[in-house]
Image (cartoon, helix red, strand yellow):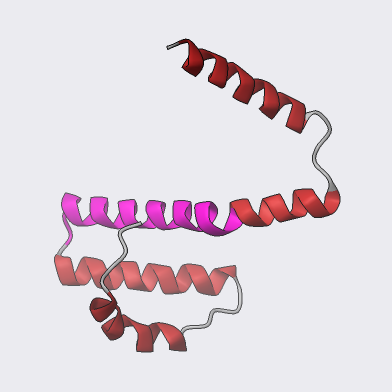
Amino acid sequence: MPYILKKDRIKLEDALQKIIPENAGEINYCIFKIALNYIKSKGLSYQTLNDLEGALSNCSKEIYRRISTHYEDLKIVENGDIDGASELLDGIIDSMLAKFNKK
């Protein structure tokens, strides 16, 4: 995720602190309104849409990478893993290491 400089965050933080959606529909609405504002400010073009879609995709990936995977790992510890998942993963890792070590 392209982190913005702290000095550039200031102009956004006050407005963002006031937005507290209560459900997925409200999150979708807020994100869509931000996207519309971006399109209005930059103009409707392939580049604008590409930038916007890329940013939204990367944001989703950042949530997954930084939050969801850790949450899933916590739940595996709390509830136990799916039978066979650890063995499969261990086999994949062993195979990758064997190929890497041959080089």
Residue 15 forms part of the magenta stretch: no
Residue drawn at 50 percent across, 58 percent down: 63
**Percent position (x, y) of residue 24?**
58, 68
Residue drawn at 46 percent across, 72 percent down: 29
* Closer to the camera in the image, 94 or 29: 94
- Image quarter of residue 11: bottom left
* Closer to the camera in the image, 79 or 98: 98
Question: Position of 7 compared to 31: left or right?
Answer: left
Question: Position of 91 compared to 103: left or right?
Answer: right
- Image quarter of residue 25: bottom right
Q: Vertical placement of 22 versus 83: above or below?
A: below
Main SS class of the magenta portion in the image: helix
* Closer to the camera in the image, 93 or 81: 93
Residue drawn at 25 percent across, 72 percent down: 5
Residue drawn at 52 percent across, 82 percent down: 20
Q: Vertical placement of 101 versus 69: above or below?
A: above
Question: Position of 1 compared to 61: left or right?
Answer: left
* Closer to the camera in the image, 18 or 66: 66
**Percent position (x, y) of residue 82?**
80, 37
Residue 53 forms part of the magenta stretch: yes
**Percent position (x, y) of residue 58?**
39, 53
Most distant residue in the top direction: 102
Identify the image quadrant of the C terminus.
top left
Identify the image quadrant of the N terminus.
bottom left
Question: Position of 20 compared to 41: left or right?
Answer: right
Q: Which residues are magenta?
A: 44-68
**Percent position (x, y) of residue 33?**
36, 73
